[in-house]
Image (spheres, helix red, strand yellow):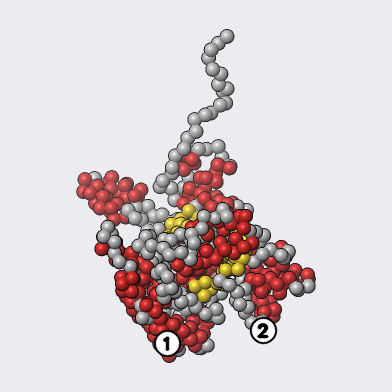
Amino acid sequence: MSSESFTPAGARNQTDVFAVHGADPEVLAYAMAKYSRSALSMRESLAEISAQRAEQFLNTFYFQYGHRSIADLAHIAFAVERLSLLAAIVLVDEQRWDGQERSTRYQNFLKSGWYFPNFGPEAETAKLYAGTVEGLFAAYQRTTAAVLEALRQRVPRPDAMKPEAYERTLKARAFDVARYLLPLATNTSLGQIVNARTLETQVSRLLSHPVAEIRDLGLKLREAATGPAWNVNAAATAALLEKVAAADPTLATEAAGVLTREVRTAPTLVKYAEPDQYTLQTQAELAQAAHELLGGMPIANAPAVDLVERTESLEVELAATLLYSVSHHPYRQIRDLTAALPEARVTEIIDLGLCHRGKHDEALRAFHAGAALRFDILMDIGGFRDMHRHRRATQIIQPFTSLHGYETPESGDLPGDAAILAEAGILAEYQAVVETAHQASARVAASQAPEAAQSALYLLPLATRIRALFKMDFAEAQYISELRSGPAGHFSYRRIAWEMYKALERQHPTLAKHVRITDFTQPIDLLQR
């Protein structure tokens, strides 16, 4: 017998794995999509593809045939700078989103400036707006300084800790308190990396928004994706080409054709993004339905975290969630009201959410129903921005309003019964400036300025409460509770994570015991980050 091993002629065991660099996002998406339609390797595909051929392919298979998964393959990085906190919250509200934003903990937002809407001829309203924002920033500055000094008095520096680290850590704790005074007009900056499908829906959603700044942001995103991208190596390339030109002008010209080639990251995939008529029409009709059902009903009292047990049918959940998205009432209150409606009325509400849906429209987020755990959360906008990052949870966010009042930071993580603002001697000013901002917001909303109701939102400080429904499975509830309750986090969302755990413990004690929770009621080391 032969001792030689047997290998079939068609066997191929040499797996080839390589990273790809230098291909334009749409060209790379085309090359990857070709795996389903061609036997060519990635190297062979990229060698023969041009931007023009990619555009022809995408026009056929993406726009004509609706193969939207192709756009999932084109990833694009954006820098979005000097946008308001209000616009940033709306921008990042995508379930398929990756990015980072400026931190209110590690940066002084006095330096960032703020957004000023167009008030037209309403000069008095414009002055009221500007004065309110300036008042909030002045209070932010005084609060930062006062809280920092109070922390220095209460938290001594360990001998082993360098003075610079001690000061930096306490300043971050002071910013944690002072950030409650930042208005939604405050400018921030962020970076995002999204695929072209998410970008298309993001642009469409932004173009549909009632706030002018956010509509303009949608236009700028579309222009950035379809226009020439900024090249991080442009200066170094220009310097190199100068050296090459000195030695060989012909070679420099040839090299410039390759090295300075204009790159457009998504010239095809987002060029047709327009306002989302499905959402615009649907929200208007849902708002009318919510007004008819809830208009005369007081907003019920609700805890900061309400784990709403599942007693309703899927149909009632869908209808209740649709109404929740355009109202300010707690989910439990809306759910109970909806459950008592005739079946035909429930069906009618669901139909409102779908009747304007176009051929390629995804159903509204409210239709992501059926999750086992539903946490109705009422918290400050600043803390909500941190919770907003949890993309595995379906989030139904109610409109901004001052109706729910505002949060006052209590201990600031100082041990015992400490009241950080009182100790810092600034509690009365904090309360006065927040209440003044809410009153000014109402006056702006009642003015004759363009988009008055939308401009008024910018005056709401981050202390203002916002309500949002978080739907998730147990694994996500476990993850959020463990991560957000950790001692390094902000006390606002640590409290919410603790309340989520306690609600879970009451309803599902055998599951809650598997959550590695950090007890919010126990003191922490303020110098540990």
Which residue is located at x 42 percent, y 70 percent?
416
Residue type, numbered disc 2:
Gly
Badge 1 is on which residue? 128
Q: Does label 1 or label 2 sit earlier along the sequence?
A: 1
Measure how far apart labels 1 and 2 are at the Cα level. Answer: 31 Å
* x then y, percent, for residue 184: 45, 75
Q: Which mark is residue 296?
A: 2
Q: Secondary structure at mark 1?
A: helix
- The quadrant of the picture occupied by the N terminus is top right
* x then y, percent, for residue 171: 33, 68
* x then y, percent, for residue 31: 51, 45
Which residue is located at x 59 percent, y 64 percent?
503
Please tell me which residue lies in front, 100 or 18.
100
- Density class for disc 2 (Cα within 10 Å; few <14, some 14-19, many ≥20) is few
- The quadrant of the picture occupied by the C terminus is bottom left
Residue type, numbered disc 1:
Leu
Task: Examine the rendered structure and indicate whether residue 341 appears above or below residue 37.
Answer: below
Task: Examine the rendered structure and indicate whether residue 66 appears above or below residue 376.
Answer: above
Q: Secondary structure at mark 2?
A: loop
**Which mark lies nearer to you, 1 or 2?**
2
